[in-house]
């Protein structure tokens, strides 16, 4: 058994110190260009400055009539203003039209606004009769006109570097005619499970006594994808030193996630192997669940050793892997869990110098209740939870009635 592994695990690192170490060894990846249609969810690598005005021209915001507003003043249903209809402006037509004194142009939403006009009289307030437009209500100058650059002006910064692109952002990029988008390179994340007992759900051995379905793999693949990384399944390996050493040494990618074999048992080889073939920076963190978590480097790749229990692995991912991927993506503040506040229904017991992540559900009257299902191997304790709360290392627990912040899943 490796002395390096045992020393690191016996003397656990405070969570804050571990995160500081993590941040110090993670750097943003380079950028690449992707088509607009593939940019959803990607992270902008540079500020986006518009080269065009949006709209590109003055246009009507409604269906109606382009008029000189002053010529409608005083108009009523019983005493309408009468204007001569001189043309029609349809969306998509670039034909130049002009409104002179006593004239009006029929115009549809999106139609090019004619010269000489200064407002659009809504169709609901007008009628046509013998080639004339009857205005049944006045309209003020500028009403119902979308001016060029009203939404976006040329030279304006519309989206900032480090933003994870949402559907509405894609619409903005399309509106300024950007078809190739500069985004951060997606981290390639290898996922490697350890344990001679592990099988896949489709395996004929999935129901055999002593075998365990590898749910961790599927949880982590989803979380990597959700965070913006590109997961690569590397397989489940037996608890064999030489096999695991070869897997570590042969890894090619940005981040390697392992599950299992990271505690201090007889076959927990990974911390010692990482120290031998690379650099073990942290092993053992004062947190629950997930205290056997560790991380280090092999060359330029970050290696995160996650526990084999699904809930502990999930917490380890949220605490260490997600922020590491966000740093690699160059996200300014990172995508964090949405949060709500509530009052504890029951007391939470904890221990000094340990940070606890407690699964909870939201109940009536703004109360927060602990899940009755415990254990870091009980995955349904996460699916049944609305989120988690953090008990700081300086507290021995939280009393019932304490106002807490819930990090939603």
Image (cartoon, helix red, strand yellow):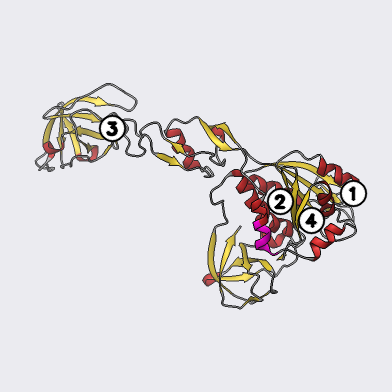
Q: Do the residues labelled 1 and 3 touch (CB within 8 Å)?
A: no
Asked whether residue 44 is in view, the answer is: yes
Q: State the quadrant of the C terminus.
A: bottom right
Q: Earlier in the sequence, mark 3 or mark 2?
A: 3
Q: What element carries label 2?
A: helix
The residue identified by callout 2 is 219
Q: Give the residue drawn at x 35%, y 33%.
A: 53
* Disc marking residue 308: 4
Q: Earlier in the sequence, mark 1 or mark 2?
A: 2
Neighbour class for label 2 at 10 Å: few (<14), some, many (≥20)?
some
Spatial CA span between label 4 and label 1: 17 Å
Spatial CA span between label 1 and label 3: 71 Å
The magenta span reads 14-20
Q: Are marks 4 and 1 in contact (CB under 8 Å)?
A: no
The residue identified by callout 3 is 58
Q: Is mark 4 on a helix, strand or loop?
A: loop
Q: Is residue 18 magenta?
A: yes
Along the horizontal axis of the image, is 153 left or right of 114?
Answer: right
Q: Are marks 2 and 4 in contact (CB under 8 Å)?
A: no
The residue identified by callout 1 is 241
Along the horizontal axis of the image, is 81 left or right of 46?
Answer: left
Q: Give the residue drawn at x 12%, y 43%.
A: 76
Neighbour class for label 1 at 10 Å: few (<14), some, many (≥20)?
some
Q: Give the residue drawn at x 56%, y 32%.
A: 33
Q: 105 and 47: which one is in front?
A: 47
Spatial CA span between label 1 and label 2: 26 Å
Q: Earlier in the sequence, mark 1 or mark 3?
A: 3
The part of the image, by quadrant, that contains residue 301 is top right
Q: Between tags 2 and 4, which lies in front? A: 4
Q: Earlier in the sequence, mark 4 or mark 3?
A: 3
Neighbour class for label 4 at 10 Å: few (<14), some, many (≥20)?
many
Spatial CA span between label 4 and label 3: 61 Å
């Amino acid at each position: 058994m490796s002395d390096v592994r045992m020393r690191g695990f016996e003397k656990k690192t405070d969570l804050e110190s571990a995160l500081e170490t993590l941040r110090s060894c993670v750097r943003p990846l380079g950028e690449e260009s992707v088509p607009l249609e593939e940019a959803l969810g990607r992270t902008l690598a540079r500020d986006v400055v518009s080269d065009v005005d949006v709209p590109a021209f003055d246009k009507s915001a409604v269906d109606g009539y382009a008029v000189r507003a002053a010529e409608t003043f005083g108009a009523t249903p019983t005493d309408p203003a009468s204007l001569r209809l001189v043309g029609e402006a349809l969306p998509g037509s670039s034909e130049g039209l002009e409104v002179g004194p006593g004239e009006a142009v029929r115009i549809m939403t999106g139609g090019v606004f004619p010269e000489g006009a200064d407002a659009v009289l809504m169709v609901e307030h007008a009628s046509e009769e013998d080639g004339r437009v009857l205005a049944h209500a006045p309209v003020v100058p500028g009403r119902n006109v979308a001016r060029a650059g009203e939404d976006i002006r040329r030279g304006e910064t519309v989206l900032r570097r480090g933003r994870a692109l949402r559907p509405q952002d894609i619409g903005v990029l399309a509106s300024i005619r950007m078809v190739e988008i500069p985004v951060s390179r997606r981290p390639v994340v290898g996922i490697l499970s350890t344990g001679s007992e592990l099988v896949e759900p489709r395996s004929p051995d999935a129901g055999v006594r002593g075998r365990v379905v590898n749910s961790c793999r599927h949880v982590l693949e989803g979380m990597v994808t959700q965070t913006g990384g590109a997961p690569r399944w590397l397989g489940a390996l037996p608890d064999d030193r030489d096999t695991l050493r070869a897997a570590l040494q042969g890894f090619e990618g940005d981040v390697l996630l392992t599950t299992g074999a990271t505690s201090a048992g007889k076959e927990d080889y990974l911390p010692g192997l990482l120290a031998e073939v690379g650099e073990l920076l942290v092993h053992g963190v004062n947190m629950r669940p997930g205290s056997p978590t560790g991380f280090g480097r092999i060359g330029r790749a970050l290696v995160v050793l996650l526990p084999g229990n699904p809930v502990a692995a999930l917490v380890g991912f949220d605490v260490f892997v997600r922020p590491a991927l966000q740093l690699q993506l160059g996200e300014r503040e990172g995508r964090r869990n949405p949060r709500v506040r509530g009052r504890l229904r029951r007391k939470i017991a904890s221990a000094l110098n340990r940070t606890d992540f407690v699964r909870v559900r939201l109940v009536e009257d703004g109360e927060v209740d602990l899940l009755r299902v415990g254990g870091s191997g009980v995955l349904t304790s996460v699916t049944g939870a609305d989120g988690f709360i953090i008990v700081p290392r300086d507290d021995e627990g939280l009393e019932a009635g304490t106002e807490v912040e819930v990090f939603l899943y």
